[in-house]
Image (spheres, helix red, strand yellow):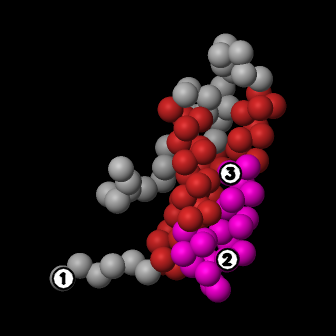
Amino acid sequence: MLLMETPNEKARRYLASIMTVLNTIELPKVSSGIDERSIRSVVDTAQSYVEDAKHYLEEKPSTALAAVSYAEGLLDALRLLGMAKFNWPEPRSDKH
C-alpha cells in the first residue's frame, strides 16, 4: 500500500526543490525581444510565491502547496521558452 504525502509534506519537498532551482537558475541572453529585466520580474514573482508558501506551510499546507506550484509553473514556462536554464533536483513522478 502506497502512503500518500500530506499537503505539508509535498509542499516541503517542492519548496526544497524550487529553492535549489532559484539558487542555480541561469538566464541566458535571448533574442526574443523580451528584455532580461522582464524575465527577472517573472523569477522574482516565483520567489514571492515561494515566500508565501513558506509563510503558509504550517497553518495552511494546501495554500503553501498551491503557492509553490505556481512558482514552479512560472519557472517551467521560462525554461520551456528558452529563457532560463535549470534542472529540477529530483525527478517528479507526479508531474504532468
Measured in 3D between alpha carbons, the distance from the residue under mark 1 to the one under mark 2, in whole angstroms, is 30 Å
**In the figure, 86 relative to 17: above or below?**
above
SS of the residue under disc 3: helix
Position of the N terminus by quadrant: bottom left
Considering only vertical position in the picture, is 31 above or below 3?
above
Q: Nearer the viewer, mark 1 or mark 2?
A: 2
Q: Position of residue 26 (x, y in %)?
A: 65, 35
Name the main secondary structure of what is drawn in magenta. helix
Q: In the rendered image, which residue does mark 2 sit on?
A: 56
Residue 50 lies in the magenta-colored region = yes
Query: Whole-percent x and y of residue 24?
Result: 64, 45
Residue matched to label 1: 1
Residue 72 at x, y percent in the picture: 56, 52
Q: Which residue has dot 3 on it?
A: 46
Res 19 quadrant in image = bottom right
The percent coordinates of residue 28 (x first, y second) are 66, 26
Residue 16 seen in the figure:
no
Identify the secondary structure beneath mark 1. loop
Q: Secondary structure at mark 2?
A: helix
Which mark, by number, is residue 51? Answer: none
Report the residue at 54% width, 75% height from top: 62
Q: Amino acid at mark 3?
A: Ala
Mark 1 and mark 2 residues within 8 Å of each other at the beta carbon: no
In this view of the protein, can residue 66 be seen by the observer? yes
The part of the chain drawn in magenta is 45-65
Compare marks 1 and 3 and give the one earlier in the sequence: 1
